[in-house]
Amino acid sequence: MDVAPSGRGRWKIANENPNVRKTKGYHLEHHFGHGKQSLAAFRLSLTLLALLFHPVLEWSDDKSALLRRVLARRRTFFHDIQAVMRYMIFDNWDHLMDFMIQGLE
């Protein structure tokens, strides 16, 4: 019985990471292995960098963390950023986050 919680924790860690890469907007399993080898490796590097950077952004930027809490799905957050930036130009990241937070009010 003492070993079961450790096993569950290990299983959770082993399964959550690939699940996030597949289903939370990173599309890791769909785009790689196609085309030129160097392009696939470059896109893989960018995806992994984003995967590592997003939690850091949520920890260090209060506005981004607020938006992520309100827009619970990561995909919704990214789609909203993409839609807004298609039609508007922002001076910086804070300006974009302020605009999105005002839109929620």
Image (spheres, helix red, strand yellow):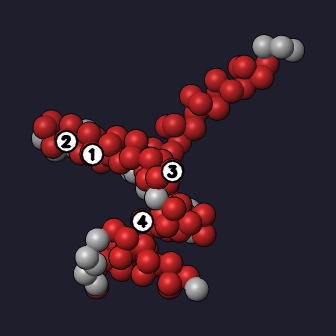
In contact (CB < 8 Å): disc 2 and disc 4: no
The amino acid type, in three-letter code, at marker 2 is Phe
Q: Which residue is mark 4?
A: 78
In this view of the protein, can residue 44 be seen by the observer? yes
**Image check: 64 left or right of 15?**
left
The amino acid type, in three-letter code, at marker 4 is Phe
Looking at the image, tell me whether mark 2 or mark 4 is earlier in sequence order: 2
In contact (CB < 8 Å): disc 3 and disc 2: no
Of helix, strand and loop, which one carries label 2? helix
Q: Which residue is mark 3?
A: 59
Of helix, strand and loop, which one carries label 1? helix
Q: Quadrant of residue 25?
A: bottom left
Question: Residue 6 placed where, x, y %?
Answer: 72, 19
Of helix, strand and loop, which one carries label 3? helix
Q: Which residue is mark 1?
A: 46
The amino acid type, in three-letter code, at marker 1 is Leu
Q: Which residue is mark 2?
A: 42
Mark closer to the observer (3, 4): 3
In the picture shown, does residue 48 fall above or below 89? above
Mark 2: few, some, or many residues within 10 Å (few <14, many ≥20)?
Answer: few
Mark-to-mark CA distance, 2 and 4: 21 Å
Q: Quadrant of residue 11?
A: top right
In contact (CB < 8 Å): disc 2 and disc 1: yes
The amino acid type, in three-letter code, at marker 3 is Trp
**Image check: 89 left or right of 66?**
left
Looking at the image, tell me whether mark 3 or mark 1 is earlier in sequence order: 1
Of all residues shown, which one is farthest toward the right?
1
